[in-house]
Amino acid sequence: MASGMGRLALLGSAALFVMALAGRLVRYNISPSDRRFFSGLPSTLCGALAMSFFLVCLKYGPQADAFTDPRLLGGLDIGRLALQTYPLYLVVMAVLMLSPLRLPKVTRRERAFWNWFQIINLVGGYALGAFRWLPEYLFALGLGYAVVGLVVGALHHDESVQAEAATR
């Protein structure tokens, strides 16, 4: 990725990611907000997924000796191929940021279990992210929220569209 087409792909995908992020922020500021759902993946989630995926590629790739924290995935060696897919990964994140897909917001829930689950994972995510520990947990946490949230958002799509129409 240091030169040639790999570098060009990385720079182009990073530029697209930044433009999508700016477009998302513009849309967020001019469109009415739904209290229960995001429209598209939030830029902060996409940034966290981009960072944690990169760190996982480094931890389980050729630079594995730079990490001293426990390896949750054992002796997994993903090689250079995973890091070479990073430009494609950034393009997918850019598309998901601008998509009309619904993602539930992290808010207070009716059941105490879900509230504690959210609190523990949010605090754990911030603490681990600050110290760059266990990026595979951070990636799994963000990816799990995105995948499960998009499924929940698709199942409740009609409700969110009706709520959005009522606010107009």
Image (spheres, helix red, strand yellow):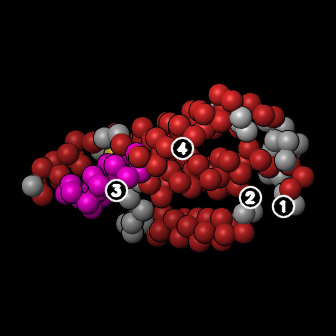
Q: Which mark is residue 25?
A: 3
Query: Marks 2 and 1: in contact by CB < 8 Å?
Result: yes
Residue occupied by mark 2? 134
Q: Which mark is residue 69?
A: 1
Identify which residue is drawn at 38% across, 52% down. Answer: 22
Q: Disc 4 on helix, strand or loop?
A: helix
Q: Which one is in front in this view, the residue at disc 1 or the one at disc 4?
A: 4
Measured as percent of width and height from the top left, residue 120 is found at 59, 69
Q: Disc 1 on helix, strand or loop?
A: loop
Q: Left or right of 126: which side holds 136?
A: right
Q: Earlier in the sequence, mark 1 or mark 2?
A: 1
Q: Earlier in the sequence, mark 3 or mark 4?
A: 4
Q: Earlier in the sequence, mark 4 or mark 2?
A: 4
Label 4, label 2: how far apart the Cα atoms are: 24 Å
Q: Earlier in the sequence, mark 1 or mark 3?
A: 3
Label 3, label 4: how far apart the Cα atoms are: 17 Å
Compared with 167, 1 (above or below) is above
Please name the amino acid that badge 3 sits on: Leu
Q: Left or right of 97: which side holds 59?
A: right
Q: Which mark is residue 14?
A: 4
Label 1, label 3: how far apart the Cα atoms are: 35 Å
Q: Earlier in the sequence, mark 1 or mark 4?
A: 4
User: Start and end of the magenta stretch?
Assistant: 20-40
Query: Marks 4 and 3: in contact by CB < 8 Å?
Result: no
Q: Which one is in front in this view, the residue at disc 3 or the one at disc 4?
A: 4
